[in-house]
Amino acid sequence: MNLFSGRPTSFDPAWATHNLSETAQPRIARAFRTLGQQVDLLLVPGLFGSGQDHWQSHWEQTYGLRRLRQKDWETPNPADWEAALTEAIEASTRPTFLIAHSLGSVLTAKWLTRHGGRRVAGAFLVAPADIDQTTHPDVALIRAFGPLPGTPLPAATAIMASSNDPWLSLPRARELARHWQSDFLEAGAVGHIGSSEPLGLWEHGATAMLDFARRRLPLRVQ
């Protein structure tokens, strides 16, 4: 059953910055462990996957998160990608919390629209690739994943967007947040948030995601 209804909100970056103290990292790791005891955390990469310098790869290695596997990251097929996500969600014994980037965020949003939110606790959608409006030269590779949903998503979601993302403008990100009834979070000027910008563990994003989980999921996240 969907327990959530949401409206776009603003994230206060004062609590989550890139320059966290050394004592913040153990706190973030502890919060990931607590969240992971209540939901299945699943990383959903986008086009080309997430390389070794991507924050998703750092989160996978540091926090022990599970990553969605696809047969073909270079020339993605919507049906194949959807089937892989369906298999991963159905294999979970608990509700799944999806941590998605770029085309993975699009895949997640479209999956929720098609399948509903019964098995999904929530989703953190980072830099959804704006298939409908972007002029990025690689858009032809993912055009088949469009159009983007235009209705509320049936689970608690947050969109985190950058102010200088070539795939997604901030006004368009806010528009998608309104359509999807997602929380709206700003990442700062960090491009496409991980595809070509090494962010390391990206503490800002981790803190924003954990804050979203505290506010919107009926879970205990310290």
Image (tube, helix red, strand yellow):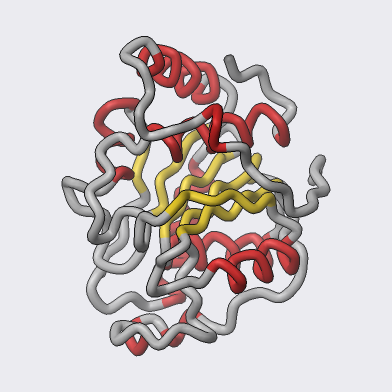
- Seen in the image, is 25 located left or right of residue 117? left
**Nearer-the-camera pick, 77 or 28:** 28
Quarter of the image with the C terminus is top right
**Nearer-the-camera pick, 86 or 213:** 213
The answer, for residue 114, to whether it is visible in the render is: no
Establish if 164 lies above or below 85. below
- Residue at 40% in and 45% down: 43
The answer, for residue 85, to whether it is visible in the render is: yes
Q: How many marks?
A: 0
Q: Position of residue 121 (x, y in %)?
A: 65, 40
- Residue at 58% in and 47% down: 123
Q: Position of residue 60 (x, y in %)?
A: 30, 36
Q: Position of residue 15 (x, y in %)?
A: 55, 27
Establish if 30 lies above or below 107. above
- Residue at 44% in and 42% down: 42
Asked which quadrant contains residue 193, the reply is bottom left
Asked which quadrant contains residue 152, the reply is bottom right
- Residue at 54% in and 37% down: 13
Quarter of the image with the N terminus is top right
Establish if 201 lies above or below 196. above
**Nearer-the-camera pick, 7 or 2:** 7
